[in-house]
């Protein structure tokens, strides 16, 4: 079955530091890949996505590239801010929008001033 | 943008009682909604897929008689936790798929924190 593995947190960074959160996946076929963000006390928000190999998703300074050869979708940001403190979930979906999403365990990011 | 709401946001109930959680798509129609459960410091686990006008599809290991799902309209799905026990305490999140959107994201609600005492 499908599965997503992401690095365990928490990750603590100073403001303006470079961020990488690793994510690898196992799936049949060609899944769509997502990063979701959950701010404290809130629900999940879609951060970015990629639907095919070599696609790069980007939003709010975050980027992730769909690497089929390494089955990875690592999240990066060049300069984090305190407001980026949240839990980040890597996820995948095989098939269309009516199919279920499989989530990783989440990585908590804390950015300190 | 597409908005999904959940009500209540927090609920505390006594063991043995039932609790209903609502999930609404506010500005779009959703034939399909999903119910997830999130344990502390863990990922979201899909509980069931809710289909408007038909029975929900439950994931393996989820008790359908305990977690009753009703999807009576294109904008509302409800999850009822029956005879709640402390181990049912969790964060419940729903998501909805926009019937008419070209993109295929699922839009997530803000979640409901259930505490059973």
Image (tube, grey):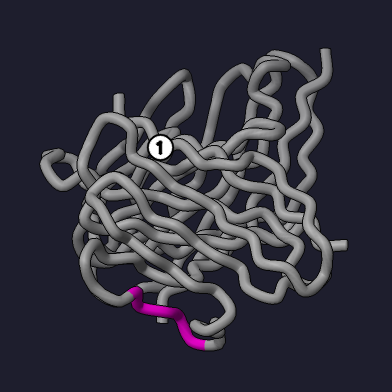
Tell me where residue A4 appears, x and y as whole percent. 51, 65
Q: Is residue A79 above or below residue A72?
A: above
The range drawn in magenta is: B56-60
Is B57 covered by the magenta stretch? yes
Q: What residue lies at 62% left-to-right and 34% top-to-bottom?
A: A42
**Mostly what secondary structure, the magenta segment?**
loop
Is B17 covered by the magenta stretch? no
Q: Is residue A18 above or below residue B5?
A: above
Q: What residue lies at 70% left-to-right and 76% top-to-bottom?
A: B83
Q: Is residue B48 visible?
A: yes
Mark 1 chain: B
Q: Nearer the viewer, residue B110 or B6?
A: B6
Left or right side of A40 for A22: left
Q: Which residue is mark 1?
A: B4
Tell me where residue B107 appears, x and y as whole percent. 37, 42
Left or right side of A77 for A69: left
Q: Which quadrant would the N terminus of chain B be assigned to in this image?
A: top left
Tell me where residue A16 appears, x and y as whole percent. 69, 14
Q: Which quadrant would the C terminus of chain B be assigned to in this image?
A: bottom right
Left or right side of B13 for A89: left
Q: Quadrant of residue B2?
A: top left
């Amino acid at each position: 079955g499908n599965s997503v593995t992401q690095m365990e947190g928490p990750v603590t960074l100073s403001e303006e530091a470079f961020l990488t959160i690793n994510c690898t996946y196992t799936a049949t076929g060609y899944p769509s890949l997502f990063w979701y963000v959950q701010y404290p006390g809130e629900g999940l928000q879609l951060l970015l996505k990629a639907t095919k190999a070599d696609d790069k998703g980007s939003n709010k300074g975050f980027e992730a590239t769909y690497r089929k050869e390494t089955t990875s979708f690592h999240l990066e940001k060049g300069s984090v801010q305190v407001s980026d403190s949240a839990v980040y979930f890597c996820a995948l979906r095989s098939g269309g929008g009516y199919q279920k999403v499989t989530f990783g365990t989440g990585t908590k990011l804390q950015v300190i001033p | 943008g597409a908005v999904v709401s959940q009500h209540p946001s927090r609920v505390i109930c006594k063991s043995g009682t039932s609790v209903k959680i609502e999930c609404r798509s506010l500005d779009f129609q959703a034939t399909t909604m999903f119910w997830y459960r999130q344990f502390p410091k863990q990922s979201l686990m899909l509980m069931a897929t809710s289909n408007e006008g038909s029975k929900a599809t439950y994931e393996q290991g989820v008790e359908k008689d305990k977690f009753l799902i009703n999807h009576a309209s294109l904008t509302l799905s409800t999850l009822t936790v029956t005879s709640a026990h402390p181990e049912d305490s969790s964060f419940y999140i729903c998501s909805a798929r926009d019937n008419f959107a070209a993109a295929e994201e699922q839009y997530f609600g803000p979640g409901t924190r259930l505490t059973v005492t």
